[in-house]
Image (cartoon, rainbow, N blue to C red):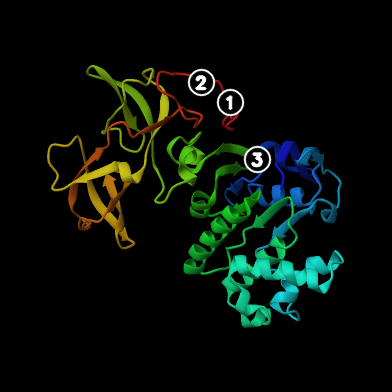
Amino acid sequence: MADVTFKGVEKTFGNLKVIHGVDIDIADGELVVFVGPSGCGKSTLLRMLAGLEENTGGEILIGTDVVNGLPPKDRDIAMVFQNYALYPHMTVAENIGFPLRMQGLTAAERKKHVVRAAELLGLESYLERYPRELSGGQRQRVAMGRAIVREPRAFLFDEPLSNLDAALRVQMRKEVKLLHRRLEATMIFVTHDQVEAMTLADRIVVLRDGRVEQIGTPEDVYRRPASTFVAGFIGSPPINLIAGTVRPLPGKLGLVPDANPALTFDLPEEFDFSSGQHITLGVRPENLVLVSPAGKQELEGKVVFCESSGQESAVTLDLGGLQLVSSIWGEEAPLIGNMVGVEIRAGEVLLFDERGIRVDPGVAEQEHRDFTDAE
C-alpha cells in the first residue's frame, strides 16, 4: 500500500478551470472520502489519480512516485465504479480473476487469490454464477473482489453505492468499512451523500467548485465546520443558519435576524463582535430544544411541519417569518399549529463572519485562510 498526495493539482477543460490548486495528503492505510455537491470536482480528482484524466497543473504522487502522465495500468491502483463494469459472459470467479489473467498468472495462482477475495466478501457460494443471477449488492461485491485480487497500492471507489436501494446502501457501507479494517489498505471513496461520508471516513475532504473547503475527521467537519457551506452540507436535518446584524442589548450583544428584526438571539460573551457586524449564527437541530406548552421562553414558534422517521422527528417552526428545524428523539412530536417555546442549548452555537467563515471565541476579524485543517 502507499500514501497518496495531491500537490497544487489543477484541471482545465478548454477555457474552463474546474480544479483550482488542490492540496491533499492521504496517509498509507487511510480511508478518505471526497464529498460535495454535483460538479464540485470530486470524481475529476479521482479520475486524475487513476490516470483516466490528465491533470493540467500540479503533481499527483502515489507513494514517492510522481504519476503525472503515467497510463492507468502503470499506476498500480484498482478502481470500483458506480455501474460495477462486470463482464456478463463471465462467472463471478472469472470476473474476479480477470485482472490476474491479464497479468499472466496461472490458473492455480488465480484460484488462490479469487478464493481469498471471495471469503473476504462472502461470495464463496456464488463463484459459478453469472452477474445476471446476482443482486445489486452482490454485483458490487464482485467488483470489489476484482479490485482486491490485484493487491494495489490504493483502492478508488467512484460513487459505488449510488445505484443501490437504501437498505443495501447501509449494508454495503458496513462491508466497505469492514473490508478496510481487514486489508488496512489506502482507500479513497467519492460520494455526494454526506451520510456515507460521515459513516465511512477516517477523514473527509469537503469540496466546493473545484476547491478544498475543509479536511478533517467526521467529528471535526460536523462540530467545527470551517464555513457556512460545510455547516450546511454536512448534517441531516441541515443546520439552522440565521443571518443577521449584531446589535447592543442591555449588558450584552445580540443578533437581530434579517428574516425577523423583531427577534433577538443572545451572543456568547466569549465572542468578540462589534455592533453593526453582519454575521451568521448556526445551531444544529438537535441543539434547538422545544418546550411545550410555551411559557416564558425568550423565543416562541408555531409548528408548521413535522417529518418523522420513527424514533426521530424533524419539527419545522415558524418564528414570525424565520423558520427553524428542531430534531427530537424518542418523544411525541407537537401537533402542527401548536405554539411551543424554543431554547438553544448553552454553548452549542456556531458563529460565522460576513464571508461565511467560522469565527473562533475571542476573535472579531480573521484573515481569509485556507480551509484545510493543519495536521
**Residue 32 % position (x, y):** 60, 46
Residue positioned 62% across, 75% down in the render: 124
Q: Is residue 172 above or below residue 28?
A: below
Helix, strand or loop at disc 3?
Answer: loop
**Residue 80 % position (x, y):** 68, 61
| Few, some or many residues within 10 Å of mark 3 (<14, 14–19, 20+) | some
The Cα atoms of the two marked residues, 3 and 2, are separated by: 30 Å
The Cα atoms of the two marked residues, 1 and 2, are separated by: 8 Å
**Residue 237 % position (x, y):** 39, 51
Q: Is residue 250 above or below residue 333?
A: above
Residue bearing mark 1: 369
Residue bearing mark 2: 366
Q: Nearer the viewer, mark 3 or mark 2?
A: 3
Q: Amino acid at mark 2?
A: Gln
Does label 3 or label 2 sit earlier along the sequence?
3
Is 36 in front, or is 63?
Answer: 63
Q: Quadrant of residue 87?
A: bottom right
Q: Quadrant of residue 279?
A: top left
Helix, strand or loop at disc 2?
Answer: loop
| Few, some or many residues within 10 Å of mark 2 (<14, 14–19, 20+) | few
Q: Amino acid at mark 3?
A: Ala
The numbered mark at residue 27 is 3
Is 139 in front, or is 115?
Answer: 115
Does label 1 or label 3 sit earlier along the sequence?
3
Is there CB contact under 8 Å for labels 3 and 2? no
**Residue 260 % position (x, y):** 31, 37
Is 341 in front, or is 164?
Answer: 164
Helix, strand or loop at disc 1?
Answer: loop
Q: Quadrant of residue 7?
A: top right
Q: Amino acid at mark 1?
A: Arg
